[in-house]
């Protein structure tokens, strides 16, 4: 079974030697509009691995806040996206990634998860359809929020005067409906 999952991941973009990503800490004055950089650029911007380790010398990652900037943040790679091709749920993908870390002797996630109520599937679909109708690029309207959509959410969060962390909230949806 593990072999077939390994084959599936490899066929869907898994690159041996590349980490899935890292839990990170963000500096106080961080510009949350930034979402994609090389590991070296993340380090220059003050983004640090939560475990105190160093980022790899090469490669790139996407800054991701699964439960808003008030919760843990991650810089994820294409290998995280390969995990998501197996199951689109970020909760599933982060559980798989975190379990893999623990099996390698690493600590679990450090930051506390906030009591943020996420948009339900119906609300996410409504958000996607509204964004699409207003001319924003949306890759799907099934409620799955990919990294491209999170970048568009950041653009609108800036426009709405919200923290641009790419995590849609009910307030974001209300402002989108009024746009």
Image (cartoon, grey):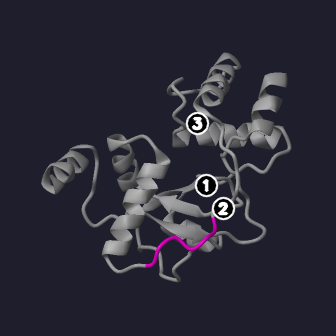
Residue at (32, 43) in percent of width and height: 86
Q: Total marks drawn?
A: 3
Q: How far apart are marks 3 and 2 (CA)?
A: 20 Å
Magenta stretch contains residue 173: no
Q: Position of residue 121 (x, y in %)?
A: 58, 31
Q: Residue 149 carries which label?
A: 3
Mark sitting earlier along the chain (1/2): 1
Question: Are the residues at dot 3 and dot 2 in contact (C-beta closer than 8 Å)?
Answer: no
Question: Are the residues at dot 1 and dot 2 in contact (C-beta closer than 8 Å)?
Answer: yes
Residue at (71, 19) in percent of width and height: 134
Q: Mark 2 points at which residue?
A: 71
The vertical placement of 100 against 5, above or below, is below
In the image, which residues are magenta? 107-112
7 with respect to 105 (left or right): left
Closest to the observer: 136 or 124? 124
Q: Quadrant of residue 77?
A: bottom left
């Amino acid at each position: 079974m593990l072999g077939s999952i390994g084959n599936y991941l490899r066929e869907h973009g898994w690159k041996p030697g590349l980490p899935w990503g890292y839990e990170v800490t963000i500096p106080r004055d961080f510009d949350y509009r930034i979402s994609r950089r090389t590991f070296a650029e993340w380090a220059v911007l003050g983004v640090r691995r939560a475990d105190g380790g160093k980022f790899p010398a090469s490669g790139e990652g996407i800054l991701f806040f699964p439960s808003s900037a008030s919760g843990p943040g991650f810089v994820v790679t294409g290998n995280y996206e390969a995990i998501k091709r197996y199951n689109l749920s970020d909760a599933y993908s982060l559980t798989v990634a975190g379990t893999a870390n623990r099996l390698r002797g690493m600590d679990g996630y450090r930051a506390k998860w906030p009591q943020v109520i996420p948009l339900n599937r119906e609300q996410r679909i409504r958000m996607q359809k509204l964004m699409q109708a207003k001319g924003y690029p949306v890759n799907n309207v099934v409620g799955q929020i990919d990294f491209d959509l999170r970048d568009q959410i950041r653009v609108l969060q800036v426009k709405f005067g919200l923290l641009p962390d790419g995590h849609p909230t009910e307030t974001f949806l209300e402002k989108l409906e009024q746009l």
